[in-house]
Amino acid sequence: MKLYRILQSQGFGSRKGCMARVRAGAVAVNGAVCDDPEAEIDTTGLELTLDGAVWAYREKAYLMMHKPAGYECSHHPSHHPGVFSLLPAPLLQRGVQCVGRLDQDTTGLLLFSDDGQFIHRMIAPRKRIAKVYRARCAEPVTDAMLEALRAGVQLNDEPAPIAALACERLDAITLRLTLAEGKYHQVKRMIAAAGSRVEALHREAMGAFALPVDLAPGAWRWLEAADLQRLEQAWPSNPY
């Protein structure tokens, strides 16, 4: 692939802008400066260096973020800053989108990609990709509440009750809830329907992939092939 096209694909600007950067000697290919924007480059194992930063070539972008509280999952946030402000410009230029959304006050694992098919697979309920949440409730978590969430609770705008894939008490006021769907305010609404209220919510995992403990709030990281395999691991048909 021509070098300027590689730069475009990775989010480093327009055709004209990428060609100008290469001609100015501002781009290194596998550590060696290349000033020919038309140079044919093998993308296998390719590393680009621009503005002192090294970028590995990726045909598609898959990344995770430890979403902090107080950020909206929107390119056009209304009341709080957007999560996209926490990402570097090239990722925004190549059009990464949130894989589902978290409320502004919800923390935890948030995925981004520019692969539409991947996004659809991760959020489609029929794919049974589990989303695991830890919720701190306003009132003690009772056995009756857990049983209701496992059996299914009725939400106002849903035709049938919605049940958790799994639900367990972690301490007196905290529970872990596993869902297949990603409906609007679903965890908060389900817990409200079961007789309590969410005071703090954190997404711990998706599929079989858990948020790394060493990823700080507001930080992001690339997802590798093994991570993607764990993410797309479906929940078993009969978990109980």
Image (tube, grey):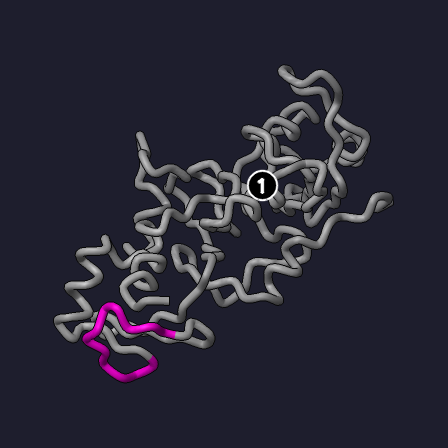
Find residue 165 and report its horizontal and vertical position in percent: 76, 40
Q: In the rendered image, which quarter is residue 216 located in?
A: bottom left
Find residue 15 and report its horizontal and vertical position in percent: 23, 55
Q: Is residue 36 magenta?
A: yes
Find residue 5 and report its horizontal and vertical position in percent: 31, 61
Q: Residue at x 67, y 23 (%)?
A: 193
- Left or right relative to 233: residue 27: left
Q: Main secondary structure of the magenta part?
A: loop
Q: Nearer the viewer, residue 230 or 188?
A: 230
- Dot 1: what SS? helix
**Looking at the image, is 36 positioned above or below residue 116?**
below
Q: Nearer the viewer, residue 156 or 35?
A: 35
The boundaries of the magenta stretch are 30-41
Q: Residue at x 66, y 60 (%)?
A: 230
Q: Residue at x 70, y 26 (%)?
A: 194
Q: Which residue is mark 1?
A: 120
